[in-house]
C-alpha cells in the first residue's frame, strides 16, 4: 500500500496547537491530491476543521463518503432512557444475592411476569447472583436493573453449549456459531428464542435475521412502484391499505442478475463492475437486503418513512415492504456485571458460548452501565435495530468479539465503551477482533471508545455506511471474514478522530481499500501486520483529511450529526400540523 507522503498534508500536533501564541487566522486551502487531502486550519488555539464536515452539512442525507447517522441508537438517538416503575424485585421471587443457589429461575420468572403485565422494571439489588441458565428478556417495555455494575453481578457458571447444546455453522466444518451468536443475557422475542433454540437442539440451522427461521415466512404488504433515491423520505407504493403510521415493517431489496444492488452498496464504484460475485456464497445468502423501518405517514399512495432511504430503491431490485419477526421494543438492561466462570479462551471459531449480552430482533432497546468479564463474546447485536449500548466495558481474559454487529443490524449506537487489555496473554490459535460489523449491516456507530486491544473489525459480508469516531486504540487485533463473504467494505465507511497508540495502519486508515470512504483526523500510521488490498481496481473515490492530527473539528462526528439532525426537517407524521 502506498500512502500519501507526509508533505502532502500539513501535520499539526496537539502540542503545537497548544503552544501557539499568535491569533492570526491562516486561510484554509486544498492540496488537490487524488484523495482530496486538505491542509488543516492552523488558527492558534483551535483544532483544525475538516472541509468534509462543511460538505456534509450541505448535503447530509446524500453525501458520497459520509453516512447520515445523527439519529442512530435508541429512540432516534435519545440521550435519556425510560425510568419505568419497579414491578418486581428478584429477592421476592427467591433469588439469593450471595451466590449460594441458581438465581436464573427466579430472575426469569420476574421478567416474564412483568412483561405479561405490560412492562416495568425488575430490580436486581446489590449482590452476586449465580445463574446456571440464560437470562431471557422476551417482552417489550421491560427493564432489568441492577444497583450498578460495581454492585450487582450475574455470575454465569455454564456456557451456551452446556445449556442449549452445540450450535454448528450453516457453512459446514466444525465451527461453533456460539462464536458470534447468543448471550447469557439474551434480549430476543419469546417465539423467536424458542424457534432458535429448538432448531439448535434439533441440529438444524436457524436463520438469525428479521424474517424467522425460514426466509420465506415474510408476507409482502406493499410494493414500491417508482424509483426512489438514497436520501429520499417518501416512496410511492401500489397498495397502501396495509400500511399505517407507526407500523414497524421491513424494507426489502432483492438483487438483480448482474448484482447491481451489491455494486450499489459499494457506491457504484467503477471497479465493482468487473468484480466476481458468483462465488461469494455467504454474501449472497444475506440477500435480499432487509432494513427495518417505521411508517411516518400514508397519504394516498405516498408513504413517508421515519428516516431517509439508505440505498436507491430501483425497480430492478423489486423494492417492497414486508412483515418481519415481531421485535422486542423498549426494553433495557442496566447497572450490572455479567461475569463468566473463568475458562481459557477457546481456539478461533470454537467458542462454547460464554457470551455476555445479546440483542437479537431487538428494536429501540438499550443497555447502560454493563461490564462483561471473561467472555468469549462481550456484546452481540444480531439483527438489531436502533439499539444503544452506553457505558459498557469488556475485561478479564481475552475473547473473540468484544463487540459484534451482524446479520442486518442497522442504526445502532455504541458509545462510551472500553475494551481492556486481557488479564492473561491469549493462547496460541486464538484471535481477537475488536469492534465488528458484517453481514450487510449499516449506519452503526462506535463513539467515544477506549480500546487497549483489538481493531476496527470489518468482517466482510459487505457492511456499508458505518462510523467509528473519537476512539483511542492500541491496534493489535485482526479482522476476520472468509472469502465467500465478499468485500470487506461497502461505501461510506467513516473513521473520524482516531488516536492509534502503536502506529499501525491496518483497519483504521482505509482510504486506499474502502470505496467512497472518509478517513479523517487519524494518527500518523504505518502498514504492518495484517495488510489488506482493495477488493476493487481503479479509483475508490475515498477521502483522507487531517492526516496525522486526531483532533479535527468537529471532534465527534456522531455528536455533531446528532445536533445537526435536530435542526433538519423531520418527516411529518400523519396527524401532525402542516
Image: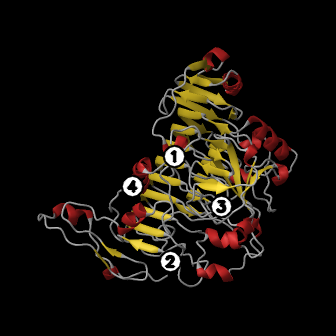
Determine which quarter of the picture holds residue 95: top right
In primary-sequence order, the first of circles 1 and 4 is 1
CA distance separating discs 3 and 4: 25 Å
CA distance separating discs 3 and 1: 28 Å
**Which residue matches tag 4?**
556
- Mark 1 surroundings: few (<14), some (14-19) or many (≥20) residues within 10 A: many
Instruction: Tell me the tag on residue 440.
Output: 3
CA distance separating discs 1 and 4: 25 Å
Of discs 1 and 2, which sits in the foreground? 2
Image spot of residue 119 (x, y percent) = 64, 25
Asked if one can make out residue 248 in the rendered structure from this viewpoint, the answer is yes
Of discs 3 and 1, which sits in the foreground? 3
In primary-sequence order, the first of circles 1 and 2 is 1
Q: Are marks 3 and 4 in contact (CB under 8 Å)?
A: no
In primary-sequence order, the first of circles 3 and 4 is 3
Image spot of residue 122 (x, y percent) = 60, 24
Taking the image as shown, residue 12 lies to the left or right of residue 194, namely left
Instruction: Tell me the tag on residue 395.
Output: 1
CA distance separating discs 2 and 3: 21 Å
Q: Are marks 3 and 1 in contact (CB under 8 Å)?
A: no
Amino acid at each position: 500500500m502506498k500512502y500519501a507522503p507526509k508533505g502532502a498534508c500539513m501535520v499539526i500536533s496537539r502540542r503545537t496547537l497548544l503552544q501557539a501564541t499568535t491569533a492570526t487566522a491562516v486561510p484554509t486551502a486544498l492540496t488537490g491530491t487524488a484523495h482530496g487531502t486538505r491542509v488543516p486550519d492552523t488558527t492558534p488555539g483551535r483544532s483544525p476543521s475538516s472541509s468534509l464536515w462543511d460538505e456534509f452539512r450541505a448535503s447530509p442525507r446524500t453525501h458520497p463518503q459520509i453516512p447520515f447517522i445523527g439519529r442512530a441508537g435508541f429512540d432516534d438517538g435519545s440521550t435519556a432512557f425510560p425510568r419505568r416503575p419497579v414491578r418486581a424485585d428478584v429477592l421476592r421471587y427467591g433469588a439469593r444475592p450471595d451466590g449460594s443457589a441458581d438465581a436464573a429461575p427466579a430472575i426469569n420468572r420476574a421478567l416474564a411476569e412483568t412483561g405479561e403485565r405490560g412492562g416495568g422494571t425488575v430490580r436486581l439489588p446489590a449482590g452476586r447472583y449465580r445463574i446456571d441458565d440464560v437470562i431471557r428478556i422476551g417482552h417489550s417495555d421491560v427493564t432489568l436493573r441492577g444497583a450498578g455494575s460495581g454492585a450487582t453481578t450475574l455470575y454465569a457458571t455454564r456456557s451456551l453449549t452446556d445449556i442449549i447444546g452445540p450450535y454448528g455453522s450453516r457453512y459446514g466444518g466444525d465451527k461453533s456459531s456460539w462464536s458470534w451468536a447468543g448471550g447469557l443475557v439474551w434480549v430476543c422475542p419469546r417465539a423467536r428464542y424458542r424457534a432458535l433454540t429448538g432448531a439448535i437442539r434439533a441440529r438444524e440451522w436457524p436463520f438469525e435475521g428479521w424474517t424467522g427461521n425460514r426466509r420465506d415466512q415474510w408476507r409482502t404488504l406493499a410494493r414500491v412502484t417508482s424509483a426512489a433515491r438514497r436520501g429520499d423520505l417518501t416512496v410511492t407504493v401500489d397498495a397502501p391499505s396495509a400500511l399505517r403510521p407507526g407500523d414497524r415493517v421491513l424494507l426489502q431489496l432483492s438483487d438483480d442478475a448482474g448484482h447491481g444492488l451489491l455494486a450499489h452498496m459499494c457506491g457504484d464504484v467503477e471497479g465493482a463492475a468487473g468484480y466476481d460475485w458468483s462465488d461469494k456464497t455467504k454474501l449472497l445468502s444475506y440477500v435480499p437486503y432487509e432494513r427495518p423501518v417505521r411508517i411516518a405517514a400514508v397519504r394516498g399512495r405516498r408513504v413517508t418513512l421515519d428516516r431517509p432511504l439508505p440505498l436507491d430503491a430501483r425497480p430492478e431490485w423489486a423494492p417492497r415492504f414486508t412483515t418481519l419477526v415481531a421485535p422486542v421494543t423498549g426494553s433495557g438492561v442496566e447497572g450490572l456485571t455479567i461475569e463468566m466462570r473463568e475458562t481459557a479462551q477457546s481456539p478461533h471459531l470454537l467458542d462454547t458460548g460464554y457470551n455476555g449480552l445479546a440483542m437479537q430482533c431487538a428494536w429501540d432497546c438499550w443497555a447502560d452501565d454493563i461490564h462483561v468479564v471473561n467472555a468469549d463474546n462481550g456484546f452481540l447485536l444480531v439483527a438489531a435495530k436502533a439499539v444503544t449500548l452506553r457505558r459498557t466495558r469488556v475485561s478479564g481474559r481475552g475473547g473473540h468479539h468484544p463487540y459484534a454487529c451482524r446479520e442486518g443490524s442497522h442504526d445502532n449506537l455504541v458509545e462510551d465503551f472500553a475494551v481492556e487489555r486481557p488479564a492473561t496473554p491469549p493462547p496460541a490459535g486464538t484471535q481477537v477482533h475488536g469492534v465488528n460489523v458484517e453481514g450487510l449491516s449499516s449506519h452503526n456507530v462506535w463513539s467515544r471508545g477506549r480500546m487497549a486491544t483489538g481493531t476496527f473489525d470489518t468482517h466482510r459480508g459487505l457492511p456499508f455506511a458505518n462510523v467509528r469516531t473519537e476512539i483511542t486504540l492500541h491496534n493489535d487485533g485482526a479482522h476476520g471474514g472468509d472469502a465467500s463473504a465478499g468485500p470487506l467494505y461497502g461505501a461510506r465507511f467513516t473513521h473520524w478522530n482516531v488516536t492509534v497508540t502503536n502506529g499501525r495502519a491496518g483497519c483504521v486508515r482505509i482510504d486506499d481499500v474502502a470505496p467512497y470512504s472518509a478517513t479523517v483526523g487519524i494518527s500518523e500510521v504505518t502498514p504492518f501486520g495484517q495488510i489488506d488490498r482493495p477488493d476493487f481496481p481503479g479509483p475508490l473515490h475515498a477521502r483522507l483529511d487531517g492526516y496525522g492530527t486526531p483532533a479535527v473539528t468537529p471532534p465527534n462526528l456522531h455528536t455533531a450529526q446528532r445536533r445537526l439532525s435536530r435542526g433538519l426537517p423531520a418527516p411529518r407524521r400523519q396527524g401532525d400540523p402542516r
